[in-house]
Amino acid sequence: MKRYIYMAIYSMGALIVFSGCNGLMPKQQVQKPKVIKKVVVQKIDKEEIKQAIRDERLAELDKMPPKEFVVYGEGIAPMNTISPAQAIALAKRAAVTDAYRQLGEKLYGIRVNAKETVKDAALKDSRIVTQVNGLIKNATITENKYKDGLYTVRMELLLSRAKWKEIFSY
Amino acid sequence: MERNLFVLILFLNSVVGSDIFWFSYRSVTSNKTLIYEEKNISPLTNPYIGNISSTCRVKISRQKNSSTLDILNQNFYKILPCFYSGKARVLSQTKSSIYSLKDEVELKIEPVRFIVDFKDDFANITILK
């Protein structure tokens, strides 16, 4: 009988030793920091919000690759030139002017006015006037060649998306 | 401080020490053939200090006994491509009727100030804003 009592006492002692007296010690209470919630009332202007949205959009557009416009201008040498060199030089300038016109068409569009005259149910006259008017900046000539009296220039214009949006957002 | 002064002297030398000119150009083409040209290079009368817009190198050699303006006028078509990247105004009109078509394009390079700096066998053209 005693043997059983000793065994019970030993096993209780072993339990206390291995449990590290955890159950006997009082638990420490962890205090959580108190979060003080403040309500900040801030007056925001409508224009400021619009500007912020606009800036954000422009920032997004800046990340996109620039828009590239490529045109091929053509020029013909005039008949009354004194030398082939002069003919080429004049044809080149005509080609550059044509390339600029094409860039203007792409960037600004074309104004078209048309007039048709009908007499006795038959077309008498038809006149179409197309106009381009614009300012072009930073255009570069990348290629040029002269063949069979025709001078061709390749002109390109790189325009960032943000700039494009800024100028042509109509 | 010394470095800033050195850069300032260099900048002033490049701007004031060189010749400043005006450049403008106008051409009209009809049916893809050049019919009219207006070239202008003239010296600037008032001193001007402006920001550099772009630079361009052209193969021109300075001849003795000739002024800078004469050299620029003689080599006008060599320096013209330097100004294509600037502001160019284009005005085009195409008139088509039943039997004919006439296409007219006017190109105008707006007046711009530039500095020319002659080296041994080339010249640096600096376009100012």
Image (spheres, coloured by chain):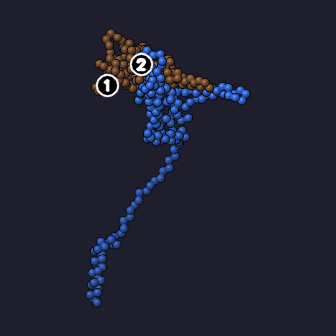
Chain colours: A blue, B brown
Closer to us: A145 or A41: A145
Using the rendered image of the protein, determine whether residue A32 is visible from the camera's viewpoint: yes
- Where residue A91 appears, as percent x and y from the top left, is 45, 22
For residue A46, what is the image quadrant? top right
Q: CA distance from mark 2 to mark 1?
A: 48 Å
**Residue type, mark 1 in image:** Val
- Regarding residue B113, the answer to whether it shows in the image is no
Q: How many marks?
A: 2
Among the 4 quarters of the image, the one containing residue B96: top right
**What residue sits right under mark 2 in the picture?**
A84
Lateral position of residue A79 relative to residue A30, left or right: right
Checking the image for residue B7, the label placed there is 1
Pointer 2 with pointer 1, Cβ within 8 A: no
**B52 or A66: which is nearer to us?**
A66
**Where does residue A124 sit, x and y in percent of width and height?**
68, 26
Q: Residue at x 45, y 27 (%)?
A: A152
Q: Residue furthest front?
A: A148
Quadrant of residue B121 within the rendered picture: top left
- Relative to residue A9, is residue A148 drawn left or right? right
Query: Considering the image in quadrants, where does the C terminus of chain B appear?
Result: top left
Q: Image height check: is B33 above or below A21? A: above
Extreme residue toward the bottom, this view: A1
The chain identifier of the residue carrying mark 1 reads B
- The amino acid marked with disc number 2 is Pro
Q: Is residue A111 left or right of residue A161?
A: right
**Front-most of residues A60 and A102:** A102
The x, y position of residue B97, in whole percent, is 61, 25
Q: Say which residue appears at 34% left-offset and 18% top-offset.
A: B60
Q: Are marks 2 and 1 on the same chain?
A: no
